[in-house]
Image (spheres, rainbow, N blue to C red):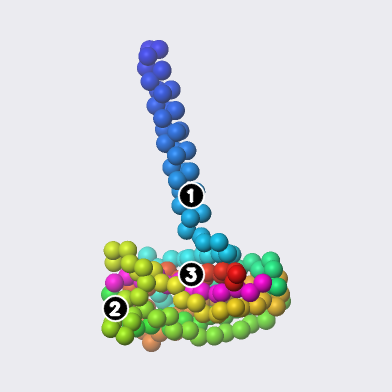
Amino acid sequence: MLSDLLKKITLVKTINMKQIILLLGLSLTLFACHPDGRVYVKHVDLSPNIEWLKKDIKEFKVPIEDNAMTYDLSLSFRFATGYQFEVAKVKVTEISPSGKENTKEYDLLVRNEKGEYIGKPGFDIWDSEHKIESHKKYEETGIYTYTIEHIMPTDPLHYAMEIGVILDEVK
C-alpha cells in the first residue's frame, strides 16, 4: 500500500514536471514568434468549412498607446492549396477612437506571375503577410477598430482559412 502511494506521488511529480516543461517551451515559442517591435497581432478563423462568406465581416480592436510613433500595418491571409485566384480582394474599414471612418480596398497577392502560391507553406496551408500601410501615423491614442470583409466576385470564397491584422513599430 505504501509502495503504491509512493508510485502515485512520483507519477504526479513527473506529470507536473512535464507540464512545466511544456508550458516553458510554449512560452518561449510564443515570444520567439513575435519579432521586436511587433505591437499587435491577431488572426481569426473564417469558417470551419474553409471558406469566407461575404456577410462574415471580421473585427479587430487595435490599441494605440503612442501616436508619436510610426507603424507598419499588415494583413495576414491563410489559405489552402486550391485557392483559385491570384489575389484576395478585401475592404478594410478603420474606425478611430473618436469615430472617424476610413475605408480602403486592397488586393492581397496570393500567386506570383508563374501561378505559384506566395507565402510560407505548411503542407497544403499557406500563410502570407501583406503590408498595406508603411510608416503609418495615428492621429489619436486609444482603440482603433478594423473591420475586414472580402469583396471577391464569388461567395463563398473557397479555401480561405484566416485573416489577421499585424501592427509593427517602425524603427
Q: Which of marks 3 and 2 is in front?
A: 2
Amino acid marked by disc 2: Glu
For residue 128, what is the image quadrant? bottom left
Q: Report the Cα–Cα distance between label 3 and label 1.
A: 22 Å
Can I make out residue 51 in this image?
Answer: no
Mark 1 element type: helix
Amino acid marked by disc 1: Leu
- Relative to the observer, which residue lies in front, 32 or 88? 32
Query: Is residue 160 found left or right of 114 in the rendered image?
Result: right
Query: Is residue 90 found left or right of 68 in the rendered image?
Result: left
Q: What stretch is highlighted in magenta?
A: 69-81
Q: Name the residue under label 3.
A: 164
Disc 2 crowd, CA 10 A, few/some/many (<14, 14-19, 20+): few
Q: Name the residue under label 2.
A: 116
Q: Nearer the viewer, mark 3 or mark 1?
A: 1
Residue at the image point whose x is 29% and y is 78% from the top: 116
Q: Name the residue under label 1.
A: 28
Q: Report the Cα–Cα distance between label 2 and label 1.
A: 33 Å
For residue 67, what is the image quadrant? bottom right
Disc number for residue 99: none
Disc 1 crowd, CA 10 A, few/some/many (<14, 14-19, 20+): few
Q: Residue 58 location in percent, x, y? A: 50, 72
Residue at the image point whose x is 43% and y is 66% from the top: 45
